[in-house]
Structures are given as C-alpha cells and as structure tokens.
Image: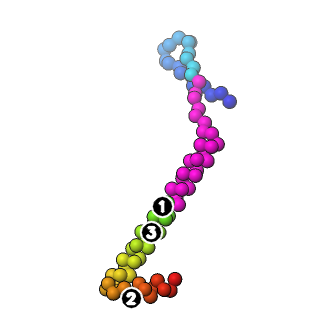
Amino acid sequence: MQSKIRVIKRGSSSKTISFAATQFEKTKRQHERELGNRVKGWVADVEQRNRLLRAAAFKLIRSLDGGRGSSIRRFAAAN
C-alpha cells in the first residue's frame, strides 16, 4: 500500500506537488528487543520495590524493638 501526501496551495495553478509518505516500520527483531527491555525494566522495578519494602520493614521492627534486636531474630526464625 502506497500512501501519498498531496500539497495543494490556494490560488496556485493546477500544478500540484505530491510527496511519498515515508513510513518507518520496525522489524520483528526490534519489536522483540523493545518488549524484552520493557519486561526487564518491570522486573527491575519490582525487585527494587521489594528491597525498599524489606529495608523499611526492618527499620520499623528495629524502632519498635528499641534497638535490642530480639524481635528481629524472632521474626527471622519464623521464616
């Protein structure tokens, strides 16, 4: 399918200029690469979020424990 753009100016003669519309089509390999990069980004985001949540949970437990560390050992042993 060939698409064309036709430019017509008001008040000009019947002479028209037409340009072929350039369409950039990505190859299957480019689509797969982009999809792979997108999924890798999602996985990295989830892993980072889990690390931050884990660190926040440990800080919360330490603040509740008063710095003794006994409750951290108790929760860690339950896993």
Q: Residue 76 at what x, y percent from top left?
A: 46, 83
* Classed neighbour count for the residue bearing mark 1: other residues with Cα under 10 Å, few (<14), some (14–19), many (≥20): few
Q: Left of 65 or right of it: where is 4?
A: right
Q: Residue 43 at what x, y percent from top left?
A: 53, 60
Amino acid beneath label 1: Asp
* Classed neighbour count for the residue bearing mark 2: other residues with Cα under 10 Å, few (<14), some (14–19), many (≥20): few
Magenta-drawn segment: 20-43
Amino acid beneath label 3: Arg
Q: How many marks overall?
A: 3
Render colour scheme = rainbow
Q: Work out whether 51 lies above or below 68.
A: above
- Judging depth in this view, the residue of 55 and 7 nearest the camera is 55
Q: Which circle, 2 or 1, is nearer the viewer?
A: 2
Q: Badge 2 is on which residue?
A: 70
Q: Which circle, 1 or 3, is nearer the viewer?
A: 3
Residue at image position (58%, 27%) is 21
Q: Residue 64 at what x, y percent from top left?
A: 35, 84
Kind of element beneath mark 2: helix
* Classed neighbour count for the residue bearing mark 3: other residues with Cα under 10 Å, few (<14), some (14–19), many (≥20): few
Q: Work out whether 23 lies above or below 64.
A: above
- Judging depth in this view, the residue of 2 and 41 nearest the camera is 41
Q: Left of 39 or right of it: where is 53?
A: left
Q: Badge 3 is on which residue?
A: 51
Amino acid beneath label 2: Ser
Residue 28 belongs to magenta span: yes
Q: Residue 75 at what x, y percent from top left?
A: 45, 85
Q: Badge 1 is on which residue?
A: 45
Q: Left of 38 or right of it: where is 72?
A: left
Kind of element beneath mark 1: helix
